[in-house]
Amino acid sequence: MGMKCLAYILKDFNKPLVPEKIEIPELRQNEMLVKIKAAGVCGSDVHMWKGQDPRLKLPMILGHEGVGEIVEINGDLKTVEGESLSIGDAILWNRGISCGHCYYCAVLNEPSLCTDRKVYGINISRNEFPYLNGCYAEYIILREGTDIFKISKEADPAVLVAASCSGATTAHGFDMIRPDTSDIVLVQGPGPIGLFSVAFAKASGAKEIIVIGGSETRLNMCKEFGATVILNRSKLSIEERKNIIMKLTGNRGVDFAIEAVGYPEALREGLDLIRPAGTYVSIGFGQPMGTIEFDGYTDLVHKNIKIQGVWVSATRHTHQALNLILGNLNTFEKMITHRFKLNEVNEALRVMENKEAVKAVLIP
Ligand SMILES: [Zn+2]
Ligand SMILES: [Zn+2]
């Protein structure tokens, strides 16, 4: 058909993404051509751009969070709810496709650990057919096996888009283990995963939600999401933060903590702030970022604590995150602090890198 699509490509790490016009190929059976209405700029996109994510296959069209409108469809495709899909429908999709048949998918029912998980904008190269494999573009081709949610055409696509990554991954953590209603919860990191953690902790009925972070803008946003105590680590030393938290918790430490930072120092601090028999959920490490000193006696066994790691998410979690946003639209609207055109993608990465933005979204 000869139609072309503008896409921004990561060719070399740490270099600006470059525009390219890609010819849109014929759809294969059970594929959809989708016009991107909003593409979220995720914190991990910044890490990918810097070459810190081992999953990448250059050249890549980055962008794993998308909302769009179906413009072409080849096959009788349905949403996860069983509704038929047709041209003009507004949709959000699960960013990863798991095989359904490996040991993790089929035996353990852990599709996020699938050994053959394909993720738009992360591990499908621009050179792999059908080429439009990421969201930093005018169009994406969703391949067979993608799980689809139909969304309202009235909803702001920029507000819903975070459900597909930071929201879903946080939902995965809370799906595995969640705070009790009387718990004092600590959230480390006020970025998108931190904000979703605050919102999920609030929905779980946490008594207090303490957030540690370095960006005043992001910390204030956490308050609007339901945080009761914010601790700015650029103003308070690690000892001062510990003193405040010990005072708040009868000198025991927090009941439940969520690491949403991805830096090893945060993990070390979190281990020191959890009470004996408490729970620690680590979500922030989307890429290898170094190690910490860990004492099996002091940090783990003698404290009798639970530590839960969270790797990406499955369709169930995208559904949970989408519903959390839909139930709190006015709050989540505030999270989208920056909107850019597609050709401003490099600027969007910059404001996410320096944490000027809480969440930036591209509107092609
Ligand atoms: Zn992401
Ligand atoms: Zn699998």
Image (tube, rainbow, N blue to C red):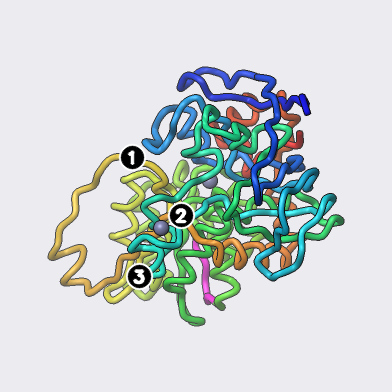
Question: Relative to 294, is 41 on the left or the right?
Answer: right
Main secondary structure found in the magenta portion = strand
Q: Which mark sits nearer the N-terminus, 2 or 3?
A: 3
Mark 2 surroundings: few (<14), some (14-19) or many (≥20) residues within 10 A: many
Helix, strand or loop under label 3: helix
State the separation of the CA atoms marked 2 and 1: 16 Å
- Which residues, given as a range, are shown in magenta? 206-210
State the separation of the CA atoms marked 3 and 1: 31 Å
Helix, strand or loop under label 1: loop
Q: Is residue 67 above or below residue 320?
A: above
User: Is the distance from the Cβ of mark 2 to the nearest ligand 1 atom less than 8 Å?
Assistant: no
User: Is the distance from the Cβ of mark 3 to the nearest ligand 2 atom less than 8 Å?
Assistant: no
Question: Relative to 118, is 262 on the left or the right?
Answer: left
Task: Residue 151: tell me if it is visible.
Answer: yes
Q: Which residue is mark 1?
A: 289
- Splitting the image into 4 quarters, where does residue 137 fall? top right
Name the kind of residue labelled 2 in the image. Val
Name the kind of residue labelled 1 in the image. Met
Residue sitting at x 73%, y 43%: 34
Helix, strand or loop under label 2: loop
Residue sitting at x 66%, y 46%: 66
State the separation of the CA atoms marked 2 and 3: 19 Å
Q: 353 or 99, which lies in front?
A: 99
- Splitting the image into 4 quarters, where does residue 279 fall? bottom left
- Residue 360, numbered circle: none
Quadrant of the image containing the N terminus: top right
Name the spot of residue 65 as percent of width and height, x first. 62, 46
Name the spot of residue 200 as percent of width and height, x first. 57, 68
Q: Which mark sits nearer the N-terminus, 2 or 1?
A: 1
- Residue 312, numbered circle: 2
Quadrant of the image containing the C terminus: top right
